[in-house]
Amino acid sequence: MDTTATFWLPVPASTVAQDIDALWSFVFWISTFFFLLILGMMIVFAIRYRRRAGDVERLDKGPSHNNPLEAAWIIIPTLIVLVIFVWGFRGYMKMTVVPANSMEVKVTGQKWFWSFAYPEGASSVNDLVVPVDTPVKLLMSSQDVIHSFYVPAFRVKRDVLPNRYQVAWFEANQVGEFDLFCTEYCGTSHSDMIGKVRVLSKADYASWLEESTIGAEGMDPVELGRKLYTAKACMTCHSVDGNPGNGPTFKGVFGHQVEFADGSSLMADENYIRESILSPRAKIVAGFQPIMPTYQGLLKDAEIDALVAYIKSLGAESE
Amino acid sequence: MSNAATHTEPLRSNLAVPDQIDEKTGLPRENYIQDGGKGLKSWLLTMDHKRIAILYLITVVAAFFVGGIMALLIRLELFLPDEQFFNADQYNQLFTLHGAIMIFLFIIPSIPAILGNFVLPLQIGAKDVAFPKLNLASWYVYMLGAGITLISIFTSAADTGWTFYTPYSSSTSTSVIPMTMGVFVLGFSSIFTGLNFIVTVHKLRAPGLTWFKMPLMVWGLYATAIIQVLATPVLGITVLLLTLERAFGIGIFDPAMGGDPVLYQHFFWFYSHPAVYIMILPGMGIMSDLIATFSHRKIFGYKFVAFSSLAIALVSFLVWGHHMFTSGQSEIAVMIFSFLTFMVGIPSAIKVFNWTTTLYKGSISFAVPMLYALGFLFLFTIGGLTGIVIGALSLDIHLHDTYFIVAHFHYVMVGGTVMALIGGLYYWWPKIWGRMYSRTLGVFAFLLVFVGFNMTFFTQFILGARGMPRRYFTYVEQFQPLHAFSSSGAMVMGLGFLLVAINLWWAIKHGKPAGSNPWGALTLEWTECTSPPIPHNFKETPKIEYGAYEYDRVIPTMEKQG
């Protein structure tokens, strides 16, 4: 079994990838053959029958039609594409029909991050963690516009819609980290709506689950907040260096006066930060759009505490 | 009869004899440029199909360069990941405008409205199109639509992508309504042209010009016109519904208001897939004319080439769902759409085989238009074959919405349509202006365009297959070298297009007089018309005795003036 990337295709890391890559090779070589055939004929004819002096004074003696030849180049390509059609459809059905024993992960797409809820109660953002050699069913929906869940290494892609569940599945057969992209254009940070799929051995997955459901107790809250800032995709819109992104920077917010779009203002305290995480559209900072989704249900209390501590530390640093 | 080597014998009164040639300019004294009236007003109120073609030429080429500059800015930004020259929002507006301008303002009107308008009546021996006023109206409607679209650019340019997918398009804060209303208005321009061509082909062919004697350019335009008339209203309705939703909150597509976003995709592609063939069919028509003329060969399998255009026009209405294999259609729907997608590929393959075989035993000239025809054959074959790759369901799931798709449609639209358009412009330029351009510069510019194009877009096949999603402002590090190479190619291609424009522009004033039939073609615009033609094309209605490409019966007279 080939488990490395080729010139054309990324690492085949799921059970369906083999079949798709085989079809790719089949179509690739057939196409190359026909392309070279056309190109070859074109070059040979162009050289052999290039215009010579006196040519234009004679009548065209070449054939003007040939029905058996026409029939041949209608029937042969038709048969070939029928093979490709059936092969492609069978592959598609394999990718569509979810195995009965699959583990189910709820996937939510929103501007501009992915969140995942696991059957055991754990959750993660932009970081889909799955056990190897286990079929995983993704039950997907969007909170806002259309997104599309794409993992090139698994050859899996499905649009994620706001008004219905979409289903996709895969079974990773290699331990490792693989890119996860949003492939349906969704606005400003579409190209930042990327994450990782981490495929762990079954033992590692079990310990990851345990760790993430217990929480990182005993960790310094500022350190945990710094980790969550990346892990929960705050970084997509909020900088920590003072530059505004899609949302205001975290630097120097805490303990300072914040101006809102409706003209009011407020001293940023712990409760303001907490409210901004859980009901982000309650107060909109002047100059920004009300685009942030709520993190209700995505963060545990300890994690919110940690983020508040982290933002607090950034406020202090600026003074 | 069929064995006799007869030279073309035009009605002599139709061609300028030496004393009617102006000694100073070297062009015929009477021609549509000088005799159609002087001053701007005579152009803006003209009903001459040739002058309307020139109006379209100016505006559509301007749109091409505006859209092209945006393409170069996009490639400049993508040379490196992260923010370089534009921020994410500006980038999103750039690719939206690039797409919308290239599709709606450039490529859809390009060949029919410029070259179709100029040559269709000439090729069928008519004095004009059937409805000259409607023809002029189509240009004004085009200008109105273009103007409305431009409002969007100057307010806050839409950032939805040219596809205006809901619910993004119904929720973004940028100005989508001017863009969709512009598209709505532009549609009528397209319908007017299509309607005009259908009636013209049916009613105004010269005596003796039966359907199978017509140039294949006319077949291509006719098949295109059918799609323009039948499909464009659906786009009009779709963007109108979208506008109503945005303006008045009537829930049709936005789920927040009880609508269905996938319904929008069905509506949109029901037009926009046939529209792909509005873009390529006229280019295929030009290809047939170029290949036959520059090989001095009867086109191989005329009827197969002609009917394959109609087959494409009909089947093209039934494949829209292949843009939506990941949207969540039923398995039976994706199966049918995949099957029909393969079937619509067959008529294109028939054309490619017939064009290639036409070269066999020909007398092949490498004039500049022929280089573009051979370039088309090379690039369109790649475009077509990669269409087979993404017609296969399981492969499309991997490749959908990646750079593979971007590369595929640029191979068809630029490698096909734009190559045909430029080939056609080079081919008919001596007829339109009476003067010839520089061959040396023409060859050089072709090489830049051809090499630059392949650098730009072949690279994108690799990017896409490796998983690079489209419409990305920035990208992960591993894609950087390929992006940089693609961007470099775009600059080479851009320079090539600029040189094409300079060469053609220079020829209008300074080119050598070309003569009525410099290529030795057999179609009426060359055998029975002066270069440039007189205002009503023919002094006497031509009598048609042989078909468009009967080089096996007729030896053309290569008439050069001056």
Image (tube, coloured by chain):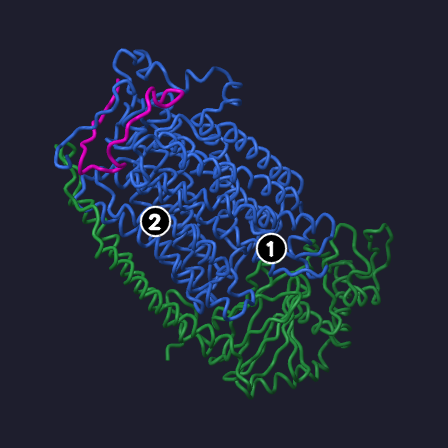
Chain colours: A green, B blue
Judge whether residue B555 is colored magenta: yes
Q: Nearer the viewer, residue A217 or B112?
A: B112
Judge whether residue A261 is colored magenta: no
Q: Identify whether B35 is placed above or below B464.
A: above
Residue mark closest to the camera, 2 vs 1: 2
Name the spot of residue B425 as percent of width and height, x first.
37, 34
Left or right relative to B248: residue A146? left
Residue plotted at (73% across, 69% down): A295
User: Which image quarter holds the N terminus of chain B?
Assistant: top left
- Label 1 marks a residue whose chain is B
Tag 1's secondary structure? loop
Q: Disc 2 and disc 1: Cα gap in Å?
A: 35 Å
Crowdedness near tag 1: few (<14), some (14–19) or many (≥20) residues, C-alpha within 10 Å: many
Identify residue type, mark 2.
Phe
User: Which image quarter holds the C terminus of chain B?
Assistant: top left
User: According to the image, label 1 marks what residue?
Assistant: B165
Q: Which disc number belongs to residue B307?
A: 2
Circles 2 and 1 on the same subunit: yes
Q: Nearer the viewer, residue A280 or A47?
A: A47
Q: Magenta part mainly helix, strand or loop?
A: loop
Residue plotted at (37% across, 37% down): B422
Do the CB atoms of the residues marked 2 and 1 lie less than 8 Å apart? no
Q: Which disc number belongs to residue B406?
A: none
Q: In which quarter of the image is residue A212?
A: bottom right
Name the spot of residue B179 as percent of width and height, x first.
62, 43
Q: What stretch is highlighted in magenta?
A: B533-562
Q: Identify whether A140 is placed above or below B504.
A: below
Identify residue type, mark 1.
Tyr
- Label 2 marks a residue whose chain is B
Name the spot of residue B554 as percent of width and height, x first.
19, 33
